[in-house]
Image (cartoon, grey):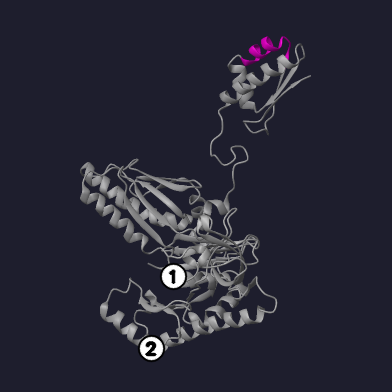
Amino acid sequence: MTEELLVSTIGRETRLALVSDGRLRELVIEAPEAVSVVGALYWGRVKKVVPGIGAAFVDCGLARDAFLAARDAGVPGDPAPIERRVHEGEALVVQVVKDPVDEKGARVTAWPAFAGRYLVYTPRGEGLSVSRRIDDTVERDRLVGLVQRIGPPPGGLILRTAAAGAGRDALADDLARLHDRWAEIEAARQLASSDGPPARLDRPLDPVARYLERMREPPDLVLLDDPSLLAEARRACGDTVPDMRLESHGGPGPLFARHDLEAQIAAALEPNVDLPSGARLAIEQTRALCAIDVDTARFTGPSSRDDTVLRTNLEAAREIAWQLRLRDIGGVVVIDFITMDAPAHRAEVVAALRHVLADDPVAARVIGLSPIGLVELTRARVRAPLSRRLTEACASCQGSGRVKTARAVAAEILRAAAAEARAEPGRRLSITAAPEVVAALDGEGGLAEIESLAGTTVTFTAAPDWPRESFEVAAC
């Protein structure tokens, strides 16, 4: 699979699109007023400790205080409650692990981690571990031996998947860069001690470097349409990914037209996803969870029902993993696969879902089948979902996704007119509403009913610009 990262700055925002074999896999959008702070390090001060929720709130200098959970403070694995881990007024070095979303502040950890090309360094951690994706025992032992001979600095280390095949010098250089970065953070904290927290301790990375840092494997090519951003990316990647291909887009037309990305972005906002077989996914996101329904739709399959259902569900599992990453859906996800009678088929679909989610850089965990046949999973929330970043609540329905029927609004007008007629007997009534509501009133005999109630004439005005649920009843 060929992966390209396309970076465009047209439109007063930076858009990074990861494209796999021509298909949009992930989209990150950074507007000037909403730049991601994930990975940023701050010297903050604990403002409030709340034992009831097992968390503390830390002033990092951001718009809202950051959220520090008990498990992200103190000593890892320590069962002590939050009030015994931190105290109000305490100064802490914290790292952002989740951007602010809606009314919630950023989520932070007191256990920072720095990702290099081959290693992840946790200055306050301990031990050496190897990515589970490196399953060759000989290679795992080789890598551990190399790092131990290098003599790692105090802290914890994780050998990333990309470390497979790396030599001693490459690992040593990567580790030295990570250790130097932590030393810079410590020096920045000492420098800021005269003024005290809050203060940002690290230098903001450019969008490309920040995105590449979180990827398990670098893309085959990074293509940018902004020469200044290209120069920044080359400087940032010079040490960590020296062989990264970074090129300037010189072709005709906008960069995102190269893979028809605008149409793919629009499709990622639609609730329905058609599968190649003819089956379909229906994706519905709410504040509490995301529900996904699998439907065979036009797909009937060439063989038995059981085989058709299994094939459809396996295809759906692959597409669901893709859509979760593309749409940046986090939190609880409930999937209603087509009912499978065979236990072996159910196990196969759950295993397939776990397998494809393993490629997701955001942590995801499949809980399994519920007693009523639903598959439950959780996926970490890092940013607001794509739909929340590109759309807003409908002014008419206030985000519910539904509006009253014209007939229901017409009935409301009848009730409002009756109340107005009783309050102002004998006075002429003026009613203004959307055209389809006026038509519903006229078609249902509402005009005659209102005039009978009012005992006088009624004037109707159709307002084309009014939302369906808006109307006005006034005595003249």
Residue drawn at (32%, 52%) of the image: 368
When asked about the image quadrant of residue 90, the answer is bottom right
Give the alpha-carbon distance from disc 1 to disc 2, as whole Å.
30 Å
- Residue bearing the label numbered 2: 168
Along the line of sight, the residue nearer the viewer: 183 or 139 = 183
Tell me, for residue 254, which label it has, or none. none
Q: Does 420 appear above or below 354?
A: above
Amino acid type shown at disc 2: Arg
Classify mark 2: residues with Cα within 10 Å, few (<14), some (14-19) or many (20+).
some
Q: Where is residue 13 in the image (x, y as percent from the top left)?
A: 62, 62
Residue drawn at (30%, 57%) of the image: 352
Q: Is residue 453 magenta?
A: yes
Along the line of sight, the residue nearer the viewer: 146 or 298 = 146
Q: From this viewpoint, is residue 258 visible? A: yes
**Residue extent of the magenta highlight:** 446-458
Q: Does 420 appear above or below 344?
A: above
Q: Where is residue 296 in the image (x, y as percent from the top left)?
A: 32, 42
